[in-house]
Amino acid sequence: MLIVGLTGGIGSGKTVASDWLAEQGIEVVDADQVAREIVAPGEPALNAISRHFGPGILLSDGSLNRAALRQRVFSDPAERAVLESITHPAIRERILRHLQAAASAYTVLVSPLLFETGQAGFCGRTIVIDVEEATQKARASTRDGVSEAQIASIMAVQMSREERLKRADDIIVNQGDREDLYLQLEHLHRQYLALADEMNHG
């Protein structure tokens, strides 16, 4: 089965792109959503997080206090490493489960850390949605109300733009309007349908 990895920096337009592909009948597995799934109450990863970071990391309803956790790990690389050692394997396993259950012509895995976490290894093709850093910052701050410091820290854990582009099989430049983005996506979508067809009948 053809799996296409879709990535890009913060504010690059990954969600707009994956929503369009979903409208074409393509199943989308979203790594961010999976990351939320595996820390839901009752999940083994959440139990491991609260064992390590203490019960103060949970809200009164037993769900994860994301703000408290973010504060703990952003300022402490050792704590971040512990968190990643708990969450990354759980995320990989759950992503794989979702990918195996998908039934569309090809499947898209959307992940902001596709290359950084080795998730690109699941994929037959990878797309990078590329925008200039100034555009990223402007979009992220207006869309999510994310502070400049937060944007900088998110960009710091993501691979450099140059490195991402080097690793991509396909690149979409998203500096224009949505129509321009959709045209580029449509072109790739047709290619992937043909490739998936070839793989199924090859």
Image (cartoon, helix red, strand yellow):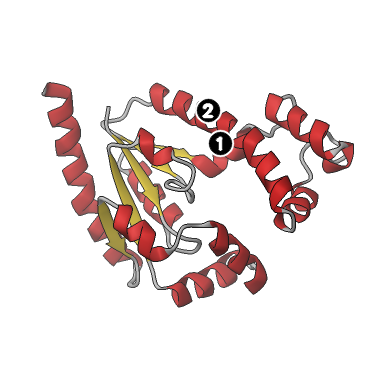
Whether residue 54 is visible = yes
Write the residue at 74% across / 58% down.
Answer: 75
Residue drawn at 69 percent across, 29 percent down: 45
Label 1 crowd (10 A; few <14 / some 14-19 / many >=20): some
Residue 70: x and y, percent? 73, 52
Q: Is residue 183 left or right of residue 174?
A: left
Indicate the position of residue 53 as horizontal and vertical percent values.
82, 39
Q: Quadrant of the N terminus?
A: top left
The image shows residue 38, relative to residue 166, as above or below, that is above
Residue at (75%, 29%) from the top-left corner? 48
Residue 63 horizontal side relative to residue 38, left or right: right
Q: Residues within 10 Å of mark 2 (few under 14, many from 20)?
A: some
At numbered mark 2, what does the secondary structure look like: helix, strand or loop?
Answer: helix
Of the image marks 1 and 2, the number of the one nearer the N terminus? 1
Whether residue 147 is visible here, answered yes or no, is no
Q: From what the image shows, is residue 116 above or below residue 47?
A: below
Placement of the C terminus among the 4 image quadrants:
top left
Residue 34, label in figure: 1
For residue 201, side relative to residue 55 (left or right): left
Residue 37 rendering spot, x and y as whole percentages:
62, 33
Camera-side residue of 75 and 144: 75
Residue 128, percent from left and from top:
34, 55
Q: Nearer the viewer, residue 74 or 144?
A: 74
Residue kind at label 1, given as amino acid type? Val
Gap in angstroms between the C-alphas marked 1 and 2: 7 Å
| Amino acid type, callout 2 | Arg
Determine contact: label 1, label 2, CB under 8 Å.
yes
Residue 8, disc: none
Q: Which residue occupies the foreground of this view, 177 or 1?
A: 1
> Dot 2 corresponds to which residue?
94
